Image: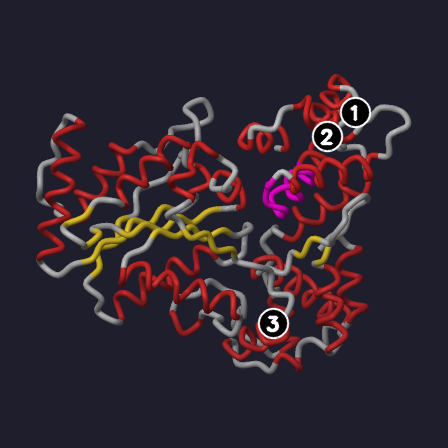
Amino acid sequence: MIKKLMAQAGITQVDLAQAVGMSRSALGRVLNGGEYPKGFDGAVLRQKIGGYLVKKGLDKDLVVRALEGDQQHSNAADPSFSNMKKAVDMLLRKQALTQETKKHFGIFRDPFAEIDDAEQVFSASPDIRYVRESLYSAVKHGGFMAVIGESGAGKSTLRRDLIERIRKENLPAVVIEPYVLGMEDNDVKGKTLKALSIAEAIISAVSPLTPIRRSSEARFRQLHQVLRDSRKAGNVHVLIIEEAHGLSIPTLKHLKRFYELEDGFKRLLSIVLIGQPELKMKLAEQNFEVREVVQRCEVVTLRPMDDVLPDYLAFKFKRAGKEVSEVISEDGIEALRAALTLTGRGQRAAVSLLYPLAIGNLLMAAMNVAADLKAPKVTADVVKLTQAGGV
């Protein structure tokens, strides 16, 4: 991942080798296979590499993520990172409350079950409120947005919330969602989503009875006319692409042209991309291939719920008809926070996994453990015991 960032920013391996004080071949072994030469401290070397790349203008978060990803990939024998990967895998594993647990806590509905109404969307977090309102504004007034979040951060929930809000507020918006099953960013791993397919999806959604032209020239002209006619009828249009980290660079570049379709001063199409952090790397300012896209696209990130964890839990349990204080103690909440804040050897900063999916999975597992122990609440000790047992 570091090599990919370097290539996007035009930084050569020779430049980096000189900056960190080692030969090009030795640096190549580090970047390609995590093979550190004798006399070099791995953590110190990673700090030097990261510092140089940030100094050259690369985004700090992207550099840190790339360094951690490369280290985790190349140092499978490092127990600290093996444990971290194991912990992440366990936290993303689906958990469910047992019948005994529901009886024990007097709770008859899963507080972390799938949301089926917009009223169930937690919006007390400033980050979530900002993303939610930004998405609606992009649809209503026109915009080009990318929503970035880790797996389980709530991206799909916000997409569903947006569509439900459009419906409830009777906004005359046509929502276009191309199918992304099997989509990858190259045709070796899967199928790339191409501009022609996006054009077909737009025409089918905006004017479903219109026969789609075969040639690319005719289809794009048809697309523009269909959008103009629909706009004159009072509609706005939004293209939403989930799993957008799987978009190829050429398609990302083409999206800029879709966004620039207009009728007079009115843009005809808003665009919302929803994806994991790999999308942020593709949309980095240093990636010259997509610089014109980056200049037009607002990138927003769903951050962990570090500051609103108690409020989030209270909201979820109220939904299930239960006070959170009847389920988990204050020290249990802090233990939950600690359990979802991971560190590995050589890391400069902790990694927070305080996202809805991980929070729900770990707490439900701890509730099952508490029920087995006949403990009245989930305490710090119960959380630690849950961790020790592998969730």
Name the mark on residue 35. 1
Under tag 1, what secondary structure? loop
Under tag 3, what secondary structure? loop
Instruction: From the top left corner, tell me how far across and down residue 158 is, in percent.
Output: 42, 61
**Do the residues bearing badges 3 and 1 touch, measured as CB atoms within 8 Å?**
no
Sequence-wise, which precedes: disc 1 or disc 2?
1
Amino acid type assigned to the residue bearing label 3 in the image: Val
User: In whole angstroms, how far apart are the C-alphas of marks 3 and 1?
Assistant: 41 Å
Q: Is residue 62 magenta?
A: yes
Badge 3: how crowded within 10 Å, few (<14), some, or many (20+)? some
Magenta-tinted stretch: 57-69
Residue at point 42% right, 28% down? Answer: 190
Work out whether 332 lies above or below 279: below
Q: Which residue is mark 3?
A: 308
Q: Which residue is mark 2?
A: 74
Image color mode: secondary structure
